[in-house]
Amino acid sequence: MSLEGFGEGQEADREASALGVDHQLMVINMNEAQVRTLDQVRGVVAGLQALEFRPGEDDTARYAWIGSVLRRFSYRRLKRAERGVLLQYLQKLSGYSRAQVTRLVARWISGEQLAKRYRAPEHAFARRYTPLDVALLVEVDRAMNTLSGPTTACVLRRQLEVFGDARFARLAAISVGHLYNLRASAGYRDRRRVQTKTRPTQAINIGVRRAPAPDGRPGFIRIDSVHQGDQDGIKGLYHINAVDCVTQWEVVASVQTISEAHLLPVIEQMLEQFPFEILGFHADNGSEYVNHRVAELLDKLRAEFTRSRPRHSNDNGLAETKNGAVVRKVFGYAHIPQHHAVSFNTFCVEFLNPFLNFHRPCLFATDRPDPKKPGRIKRVYRPQDAMTPLDKLASLPDVHAFLRPGITLEHLRALATALTDLQAGVELNAARLALFKRVPEGVAQALQQ
């Protein structure tokens, strides 16, 4: 590349020869030697001018080139801003860091000739442990399944002293610290590395991965777990939240852990609290629900078992929204010890679940054609569509065909009208405050705020 205003290439060759630059170690386009003004330096730093510069492995040529640039631009007489531009130029073309360039310039200003100070020692230390010793250590670690350093050193000593294996003559005296150094070496890691093929995961054929399809029928519930916090590495209790897709009939329960031993009886109890037959059971892919025990329970009820699909976050969206709108509002986020699970579950059965289904209104969507997108349906939540889950259940056509034996709408309405909505809310809050007096003081104070 030729730049306007630059000198002739022969002049650059003479200057490079005068510097003693070995072109086999360092390749500098002769245009670089023709950079004579700070404006041209700024153009190179800004990327407006392209220069070919490829230093070799030997730093001697680069040091000589840096000294020549500093002399060419009379670095000692430059202003501070001009020095900064030249330092950027040196850093960009030399490949050195800013700190390294600054150190070299400081040495040049002090009158020192730029040359490498470090030299390799004439007499390097001989390696005590050979690659054969590393291979022996790998063999021992494989056989003993990589014991700790002291026990491995004992094994190495025994190989020589007890069993007379002369191959361990050097390793028998190795220190524990240096044993770990050998384990960290590249030769050791290369021999210990074991590559295996990825094992294919077995498909879980429990449940169908799709969204539930209630088609206006009650009995298709969505279920999810809510953890009540950790404290000092100890997990709190869990809340199980189940919501019907059509009526939003909600049942909340508390359980000590989500293991099969604790969870399965609570799930059975929750399903019995729904006034209609369970036709579908939808959960995420957690192992607390996707297991053979839950599948057997649903098979007895002849209920369809579905699971959430990947990249379809709305498959279990109804239960997850209820987690925040109901469960977290009632129980908060603070840690609740697991041994309180029975008391909290009793509170859910006697106070919370009746309040949610008989006295707490929910919004239900109305489907309308989208005027902006023909052929699309738009869901609208109108104020007049707010009703309790019991009212929504009673509004369904042929609702009696879905109710469980022994349960009638008249009986459910009698339970709902025993208290007004206001009285039920006051009773719920009083029972909630009494319940949280049994838990740590910090949790009760957080809930009162």
Image (cartoon, rainbow, N blue to C red):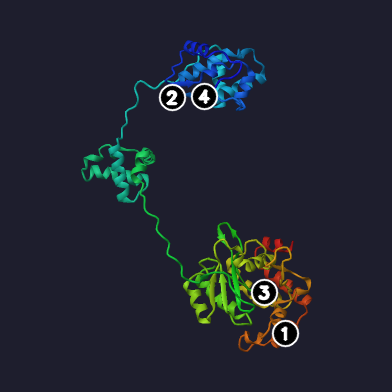
Q: Which residue is mark 2?
A: 57
Q: Quadrant of the C terminus?
A: bottom right
Alpha carbon distance from label 3 to label 2:
73 Å
Q: Which residue is mark 1?
A: 413
Alpha carbon distance from label 3 to label 1:
17 Å
Marks 4/1 in contact by CB < 8 Å: the verdict is no
Percent x, y of residue 122: 35, 20
Marks 3/4 in contact by CB < 8 Å: the verdict is no
Task: Say what amino acid the circle numbered 2 marks.
Answer: Glu
Percent x, y of residue 146: 35, 49
Which of the marked residues, 4 or 1, is nearer the chain's N terminus?
A: 4
Q: Secondary structure at mark 3?
A: loop
| Front-lying residue, 153 or 90 | 90
Q: Which-is-in-front pick, marks 3 and 1?
A: 3
Task: Say what amino acid the circle numbered 1 marks.
Answer: Arg
Q: Which residue is mark 3?
A: 248
Q: Which residue is mark 4?
A: 52
Q: Which-is-in-front pick, marks 3 and 4?
A: 4
Q: Secondary structure at mark 4?
A: loop
Which of the marked residues, 3 or 2, is nearer the chain's N terminus?
A: 2
Circle 1 packing at 10 Å, graded few (<14), some (14-19), many (20+), is: some
Task: Say what amino acid the circle numbered 3 marks.
Answer: Gln
Percent x, y of residue 254: 60, 71
